[in-house]
Amino acid sequence: MTVADERRFPKSNIAAPAPVPVTMMDRAHRNDPDHGAWWASISMEPDGRRGLTDVSQHRLTPSQGQRGAAQPGEAAEVADRRRQRQRQALVVLAAIQFMLVLDIAVVVVALPKIQADLHFSHAGSAWVINGYVLMAGGFLLLGGRLSDIFGRRRLFLAGVLVFGVGSVLCGAADSSSMLVASRFVQGAGEAMAGPAGLGMIPVLFPDSRERMRALGLWFTVAGIAGASGTVISGALTGVNWRWIFYINIPVVVFALVAVPRVLPESRMARESHRIDLPGAVTAAAGPTAVVYGLLQAARYSWGSWQVLVPLLGGSRCSRSWSRWKPAPPIR
């Protein structure tokens, strides 16, 4: 090389920095070794600018990250295992959703037999359905908030367990009051498990197309459960009406065993963990009082206090809930 060439192409003693791995792993998968980690490398461009090069096809497990980049065959195996785990988790969530929706309509056919065996009044028998629906719908927002704070998988398991206990109590009920109280317990379990299960679907399926397919399947299963409730109720009532509640026990046991294996824990990262208890109470008390007042109208006149007090009180609670705005958290 001539002197002119050396002036034109000067040597440089500055070496480009080595690629630095940057973890791109979601918080929900940090404690799950099967989910591995996504990597990216920071490289130095020829003009001196730093660029972020995505190498997510080289998805490494913690043990592989110490040896270097994963081979294409290993990456495909990890991706297949991840998809299989997603399908398993979706099956568990869909099975629980089927059970939760089924218990709304499964008592319709069995209600006359329940009314005769437990000596329900005509107005009181409506609480077998209304108790479950009002409790589940009234505390649905609170259940979603609690799952964001304490973890969706944890609250999902707690809700399924509460629902299973309520199902056992419903099947073993020997009085009308015990059955109605047990149906309220079932509704509380649904209020915890329902929003937590729905909130885990975006965590399991970060891709928008896969998420929409999973949500479509989840809602389809819910629709099938609502439509098949009367059919299942008629088949089980012919044997014994208590089996419409006992049939939930195998599904609950399956969920308690499978959920810790296939569902990751996730929660929403927020500075404030404030729980709106006044809003939750008024949201549940308003519709419950209104329904109670309407049922009382079957026994008393519309102008009696037995009807007016629940109706006015429920309306007041509903208005308070709609206007309630929680105060900002104190920093």
Image: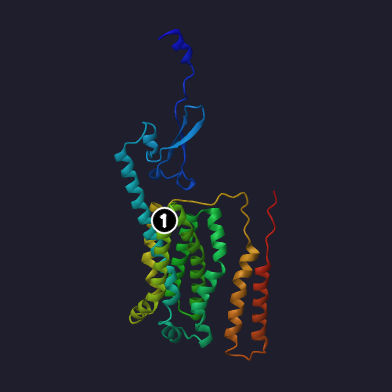
The spot of residue 39 in percent (x, y) is 43, 38
Local crowd at mark 1 within 10 Å, few (<14), some, or many (≥20)? few
Up the image or down, 232 lies above or below 274; here it is below
In this orientation, does residue 107 appear?
A: yes
User: Residue at the top extreme?
Assistant: 3
The spot of residue 311 in percent (x, y) is 64, 81
Front-most of residues 319 and 240? 319
Up the image or down, 5 lies above or below 40; here it is above
Residue lying at 46% horizontally and 10% vertically, measured from the top left: 4
Position of the N terminus, as image quadrant, is top left
Residue lying at 47% horizontally and 20% vertically, measured from the top left: 15
By what rule are the colours in the image chosen? rainbow
Helix or strand or loop: what does disc 1 sit on?
helix
Residue 272 is left or right of residue 93, and the answer is: right
The spot of residue 101 in percent (x, y) is 44, 70
The spot of residue 312 in percent (x, y) is 67, 80
Front-most of residues 222 and 213? 213
Residue lying at 53% horizontally and 86% vertically, measured from the top left: 123
Residue, disc 1: 209
